[in-house]
Image: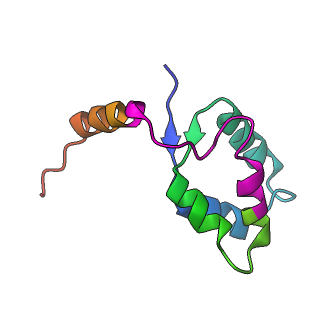
Amino acid sequence: MSSVYVFDSGPFIQMFSYFYESTFPGLWKNFYQLIEDGQILSVKEVEKEITAREGVSKISEWAKKNAIPRPLFPFPTDQYGEVEQRAAERTVVDHF
């Protein structure tokens, strides 16, 4: 089973702010492939956050465009609860 990476807004903002597609084409090619393969996804709240960013129209346009065909920002389903439970079982934080 392939890994799935759930992104908060930070990685998206960092990529659009510092890692320009024209300068890092390989990074972006791999990034797009991971999205297409369903290995990178996020949540609706992140979509709302990055589409509402003033002055950063490129990331906003990109997020809107990437809602289809494979939803990068899907609505929560019961499957998220299962994933969250598995992650909680695998995560050990001794200092709490």
Number of callouts in the render? 0
Left/right placement of residue 83 relative to residue 25 reads: left
| Residue 91 visible, this orientation | yes
Q: Magenta residues, as a range?
A: 61-80
| Magenta segment main secondary structure | loop
The figure's colour scheme reads rainbow
- Does residue 76 show up magenta in the picture? yes
Left/right placement of residue 83 relative to residue 66 reads: left
Q: Residue at position x 76%, y 56% from top?
A: 62
Outermost residue, top side: 1
Task: Give the position of the C terminus as an image quadrant.
Answer: bottom left
- Does residue 54 show up magenta in the picture? no
Residue 31 placed where, x, y %? 69, 43
Residue 8 placed where, x, y %? 50, 57
In this view of the protein, which residue sits in the foreground, 91 or 51? 51
Q: Is residue 71 above or below residue 62?
A: above
Q: Quadrant of residue 24?
A: bottom right
Outermost residue, right side: 22
Q: Residue at position x 73%, y 64% from top?
A: 59
| Residue 11 visible, this orientation | no
Q: Is residue 60 above or below residue 25?
A: below
Residue 9 placed where, x, y %? 55, 61
Q: Quadrant of residue 36?
A: top right
In this view of the protein, which residue sits in the foreground, 25 or 83? 83
In this view of the protein, which residue sits in the foreground, 78 or 25? 78
Q: Residue at position x 51%, y 50% from top?
A: 43
Q: Residue at position x 27%, y 35% from top?
A: 85
Residue 16 placed where, x, y %? 72, 64
